[in-house]
Image (cartoon, grey):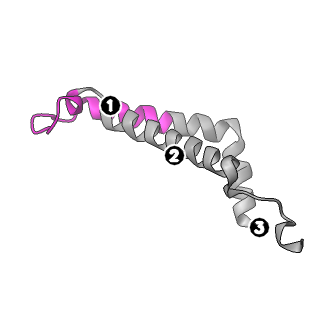
Amino acid sequence: MTLLRLIEFLRRASARGGSCGVLALVALIDVFVDKHHAHTKAEHLPAFWSVFGFVACVLIVLLSKAFGKAGIMTREDYYDE
């Protein structure tokens, strides 16, 4: 039952706003981090890893939903037949 409460809490606008606020704070902190030892040119961009992680997370969710709709998910009564 606590998982349902967590999901309902995360659906609220305040939780979404808080998540966006944390993402903005991490991106702001990243601007002040020394990037002298970065391995690639992309790592020199401000908030690169924050944006990269967010985009990767969104892609994982969208691809998972696409795979589910492409045939992984099935009817609930599949085994009853």
Q: Quadrant of the N terminus?
A: bottom right
**At 17% across and 29% down in the image, what residue appears?**
41
Q: Which residue is mark 3?
A: 1
Where residue 28 appears, as percent x and y from the top left, is 35, 30
Q: Amino acid at mark 2?
A: Ile
**At 87% across and 66% down in the image, what residue appears?**
77
Q: Which residue is mark 2?
A: 60
Q: Amino acid at mark 3?
A: Met
Where residue 39 appears, as percent x and y from the top left, is 14, 39
Rounded to the nearest whole Å, what is the CA distance between mark 2 and mark 3? 26 Å
Where residue 9 appears, as percent x and y from the top left, is 70, 49
Image position of 56 (left or right of 12): left
Q: Is residue 80 above or below residue 74?
A: below
Q: Amino acid at mark 1?
A: Ala
Q: Residue furthest bottom?
A: 80
Foreground mark, 2 or 3, reads 2
Q: Earlier in the sequence, mark 3 or mark 1?
A: 3
**Residues drawn in magenta:** 21-44
| The magenta stretch spans residue 32 | yes
Question: Where is residue 33, by image quadrant?
Answer: top left
Q: Could you classify mark 2 by the number of other residues whose Cα lies within 10 Å: few (under 14), some (14-19), or many (20 or more)? A: few
Q: Is residue 74 above or below residue 57?
A: below
Q: Is residue 60 above or below residue 1?
A: above
Q: Secondary structure at mark 3?
A: loop
| The magenta stretch spans residue 68 | no
Q: Which residue is mark 1?
A: 47
Given residues 44 and 74, the one toward you in this image is: 74
